[in-house]
Amino acid sequence: MENNTQPLYRNYIEENKDRFLGELFDLLRIPSVSADSKFQGDVRRAAEYLCNRLSEAGADRVELFETTGHPIVFAEKKVDPALPTVLVYGHYDVQPADPYELWDSPPFEPVVKKTPEHPQGAIFARGACDDKGQVYMHVKAFEAMMRTQSLSCNVKFMIEGEEEVGSSNLEKFVRANKDLLRADVILISDTGIISNQTPSITVGLRGMSYLEVEVVGPNRDLHSGRYGGAVANPINVLCSMIASLHDEKRHITIPGFYDKVATLSLEEREALHDAPYDEKEFTQDLGIAEVYGEEGYSTIERVGIRPTLDVNGIWGGYIGEGAKTVLPSKAYAKISMRLVPNQESEEITQLFTKHFKSIAPAGVKVTVKPHHGGEAAVVPTDSTEYRAASAAFEECWGKTPVPTRDGGSIPIVSLFQKELGLDSVLLGFGLDSDNIHSPNEKYGVFNYFKGIETIVAFYQHYTRMKQ
């Protein structure tokens, strides 16, 4: 059966490439920015667009589930209750495109341009890689299987609109709809590969604690000449407090922060370096003179198995054109901490809050506002699901994928493990150079279509291995 159906779905993909690309462009044109309320209507439009495409592709049931925030898209196709069920997870919301002036082309007007990493062309648009381009591969893979009668098992879709703001409503939805979401495996494409020459599968993700801090000094902005040197400047204080959160070895100084950090054996650490890595190429790509980070660990380890603390934004005082000699009343910063297995996001948030307030001088008041968090996750490499994903890469890419640890966070993966008892297959196809969360985000045309093909191959290998 497999040898007969594969050419059919591949031919179908090839014959419909222009339409598949055009439909993705239509989705990318919708500015579904979940973090900004002015885009609320656009977020819903993106959800409705996916509902329509899933219905056209052949889903038995397509439904938009309302939440207190943005809606969740659910769809399913039942082939045979005796066959396994794949639950596809993804998100249709995107990061803000600001600053717009740093984009080479408008962020919500997708264009294809060739790049060194993508000689066949890359789609430039906000959400092209994270995650519209990758989630839409699943919609088109589903359509290709339906049109060629090659869907080998049951499939469900759960696509949310709040991943970029913490997925707070998805947790409630999962807990309230366990029967609806019953499946054998979760399939996610929101990660990446090492390169188009070296495919990989992500087997570890870091957790997250994200918060905002406010430092308040005098009850109003002051003249810096009359008051400077006599009154605590909230911006100066905030910068000093932030600087103190790392020591000279770049260790995080919050008491208790490392208490539960999972320690990898020497063998496990050495295994991480099986993935190809060129530090000269890494620094040249980023335009930096050298790497930087926690003493005693390599770059691969720093971004994969070690926790971090970073300032994501800082502001206060006068930032307009020209000069204004002001001593500001308030200063702010957004801070994220990437967490590793055994660290709990709520506990880390509490430890940060207690410590940050304790190091504030008496001349200021400090407020810490938690935004969202999530737990780290590690998925096994000896499961049927992983072996099916590896076989799919071997079939479609001609190479065995390398298992890797990703420094990013998908908090829902640990929730799926806890609430549904299911591991996830992180079958992503983006590249580190695709600028997710940054201006000029892109996604390779090759990766988009090869991803569709690999997803179909996963279904076939997975169903065969489960029987």
Image (cartoon, grey):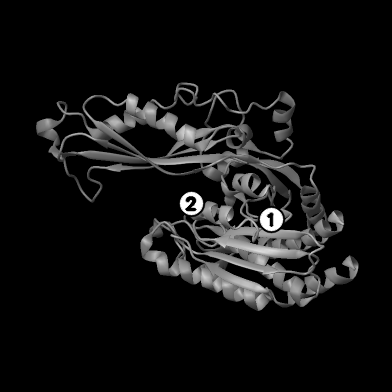
Residue at 65% across, 58% down: 179
Q: Which mark is residue 18?
A: none
Say which residue appears at 15% left-offset and 40% top-offset: 220
Q: Callout 1: helix, strand or loop?
A: strand
Q: In which quarter of the image is residue 343?
A: top right
Q: Which of 215 and 251 is in front in this view?
A: 215
Q: How crowded is mark 1: few (under 14 residues within 10 Å), some or many (20 or more)?
A: many
Res 184 → quadrant: bottom right
Amino acid type at image mark 2 = Ser
User: Is 435 above or below relative to 31?
Assistant: above
Q: Which residue is drawn at 86% across and 58% down?
A: 464
Name the residue carrying label 2. 168
- Please say if 209 is above or below 243: below
Percent x, y of residue 356: 36, 29
Q: Choose between 451 and 194: the one closer to the eye.
A: 451
Residue placed most toward the observer, 421 or 311: 421
Query: Does label 1 or label 2 sit earlier along the sequence?
Result: 2
The front one of 321 and 223 is 223
* Left or right of residue 97: residue 3: right
- Percent of width and height locating residue 238: 31, 32
What secondary structure is found at the residue carrying circle 2?
Answer: helix
For disc 2, the neighbor class at 10 Å (few under 14, some 14 to 19, many from 20) is some
Q: Mark 1 sits on what residue?
A: 187
Q: Can residue 26 be seen in this view?
A: no
